[in-house]
């Protein structure tokens, strides 16, 4: 395993954790209701600012799917899957 593979894998791992943190923060907001505490709004601001530049172009290609009154965003699972696959490739370098 080369140094480039380790660095690339680490960067992808951090991005993967930010994607998971974004999902958790969004679901906490949906399930908790009421006013949003400062820590949660800070977490959402950081996760959205770092992941949205990658998710927005994917979201333009993979449109959200509407099922009745629910709208499923397929961009995040698709990006998460690609990040996981790229990490595996980076570890092989």
Image (spheres, rainbow, N blue to C red):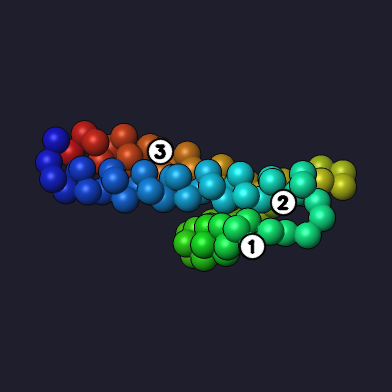
Mark 1–mark 2 Cα distance, whole angstroms, equals 12 Å
Q: Which residue is mark 3?
A: 84
Q: Position of residue 86 (x, y in %)?
A: 34, 42
Mark 1 or mark 2: name the one nearer the start of the chain: 2
Q: Indicate which disc residue 78 carries.
A: none
Q: Any mark on residue 38, and which?
A: 1
Left or right position of 65 against 90: right
Q: Quadrant of the C terminus?
A: top left
User: Label 2: which residue?
Assistant: 29
Of callouts 3 and 2, the N-terminal one: 2
Closer to viewer: mark 1 or mark 2: 1
- Check the image and report above or below for 63 versus 1: below
Mark 3 vs mark 2, CA separation in Å: 26 Å
| Furthest-left residue in this view | 2
Q: Nearer the viewer, mark 3 or mark 2?
A: 2
Q: Does 52 sit left or right of 3 as displayed?
A: right
Displayed quadrant of residue 16: top left
- Residue 57 seen: no
């Amino acid at each position: 395993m080369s140094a480039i593979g380790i660095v690339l894998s680490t960067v992808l791992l951090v991005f993967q954790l930010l994607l998971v943190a974004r999902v958790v923060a969004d679901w906490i907001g949906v399930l908790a209701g009421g006013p949003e505490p400062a820590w949660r709004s800070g977490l959402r601001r950081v996760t959205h600012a770092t992941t949205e530049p990658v998710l927005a172009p994917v979201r333009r290609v993979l449109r959200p799917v509407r099922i009745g009154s629910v709208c499923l965003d397929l961009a995040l699972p698709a990006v998460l899957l690609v990040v996981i696959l790229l990490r595996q490739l980076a570890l092989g370098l």
